[in-house]
Amino acid sequence: MASVLLAGLWFALARRHAQAAADLTSIWLAVERRAGVVMVVVALASGVVAEVFATNSASGADASGYLSQAAMWSQNHPFVVDRLGAEFAAAVPMDVYPTTPLGWRPRGPGMQVPSYPPGLPLLMAIPHRIAGTRGAALVIPIAACVAIWTGGSLARLLGGGAAGLLASIVMAVAPVFLFQSVQPMSDLPVTAAWMASWWLIVRGRADFAWWAGLACAVAVLIRPNLAPLAAVPFLSMLSTSRRDGLRFALPVVVAGVFLAILQWVWYGSPLRSGYGATGELFALSNAPLNLSRYFGWLVATSPALVAAVGGFWILRANRHAQAMAAFAVLVVVSYLAYAVFDDWSYLRFLLPAMAVAAVFVGALGQSLLARMTPPARPVVLFAVILAVSAHGLGEARSRDTYKLAAQQRRVVDIAVALGDRLSPSDVIVAGEQSGSMRYYTGHDIVRWEALRGEDWDRVFGALTAMG
């Protein structure tokens, strides 16, 4: 509202002195020249918003899984010792699974390994060792800044200054981007890694090839199911320079080998993830319903991204745009056969594709603005940015993005209360918050929802006998 009032005041004064057209033309030239500076401001603002509204909480399976694994790596351990599980295996003729919290898997009696890939926890490990949960969670606002800036910079390279500015804002106010920017989860870090890799590739400098591969390797470690998509940027670089292609591939191959060895140690096979076998996770029958839901959520929350099709058409002759479009399509295809979810926030799976779509939206905007008179361009750009921002921020608010920290604070409060009251030998019975309770209190847990009715007496009888 303040921006609109200031713009109206300026227009009245400029019109009185017959300077409106000249001022608007100057503003447009400034946008083209200084777009990079504005993009930095947008990226930093996104990081500040993410930090201000950050949950800083290990609530639920995902957040507790990533943070507890980060704690594990910060102590230089490749697994967690499950004392209670080992005692159960000897005392109770049943699986040790009930002693394994969400976000973890049993690996034989007395050992638990993470369910989640190692990429994000490894990024969090040193900050976690220095500053605990808040330090580890700081990785997410940083990732938000990187994703916004690299996405905008890509659009600027491919389209122009206005394209970069528009792309950065479209992404920054996307409700699912805002929703994930306040939670310690992997969606923004993997998006930042992919976009950094693409930005380094499009820059086209030979000394950037290795760094582009390193960024891609980080993306692979964060989300291994998208590892095959590394072939897209690799082939794009290989088509230009064999040496650059090999430099790009080296860190990606090293990351792949490390991941294969770790999965072999953790899960018994280089091709098996902590989520289970591929056949258990993917089914072609899921594709129609997932396509309908993802598209519906996208239109409801970020309708501007639908215009990415037009942006690609404008850039269709650019080989980098072709490669990025192929990557975005493959990201979407990868999740169409994945498990079906009911909540809109699972649009987060598509964030790397949405970031690429924002680049194309920026290119479309630049092309349309170029067809207008110079004085009209900043007016239309300002109106579009205002409309996109109002819609995105409004949607984010209506979906409780800014209330998540208060909602999840209860987990920390309960953990603190339990920690003050429990004796060292006490065991916590928990379900959804089993991972968070162990993370905050350090106590063993028993998963109540993992027990069958006939198991209760045996389990609690064994717990009593163990003291």
Image (cartoon, rainbow, N blue to C red):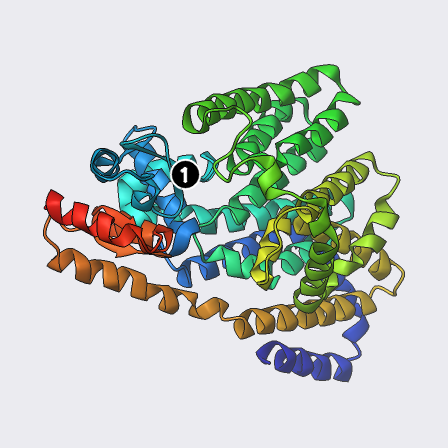
Q: Is residue 203 above or below residue 424?
A: above
Q: Is residue 126 visible?
A: yes
Q: Position of residue 274 (x, y in %)?
A: 47, 36
Q: Residue at x 62, y 68 (%)?
A: 392
Q: Secondary structure at mark 1?
A: helix
Q: Is residue 347 left or right of residue 319?
A: left
Q: Position of residue 125 (x, y in %)?
A: 35, 37
Q: Based on the displayed image, in which of its 4 quarters is residue 13 positioned?
A: bottom right
Image quarter (top left, top right, bottom left or bottom right) of the N terminus: bottom right
Q: Is residue 127 visible?
A: no
Q: Is residue 413 left or right of residue 191?
A: left
Q: Residue at x 90, y 60 (%)?
A: 371
Q: Residue at x 35, y 56 (%)?
A: 431
Q: Residue at x 55, y 24 (%)?
A: 256
Q: Based on the displayed image, in which of its 4 quarters is residue 22 positioned?
A: bottom right
- Label 1 crowd bin: few (<14), some (14–19), many (20+), radius 10 Å: many
Q: Amino acid at mark 1?
A: Pro
**Which residue is nearer to you in this view: 70 or 134?**
70
Q: Is residue 368 left or right of residue 345?
A: right
Q: Is residue 408 left or right of residue 380?
A: left
**Which residue is nearer to you in this view: 295 or 263?**
263
Q: Is residue 444 above or below residue 402?
A: above
Q: Is residue 235 above or below residue 11?
A: above
Residue picked out by circle 1? 121
Count of residue discs: 1
Q: Position of residue 364 (x, y in %)?
A: 81, 55
**Which residue is nearer to you in this view: 1 or 448?**
448
Q: Position of residue 234 (x, y in %)?
A: 70, 26
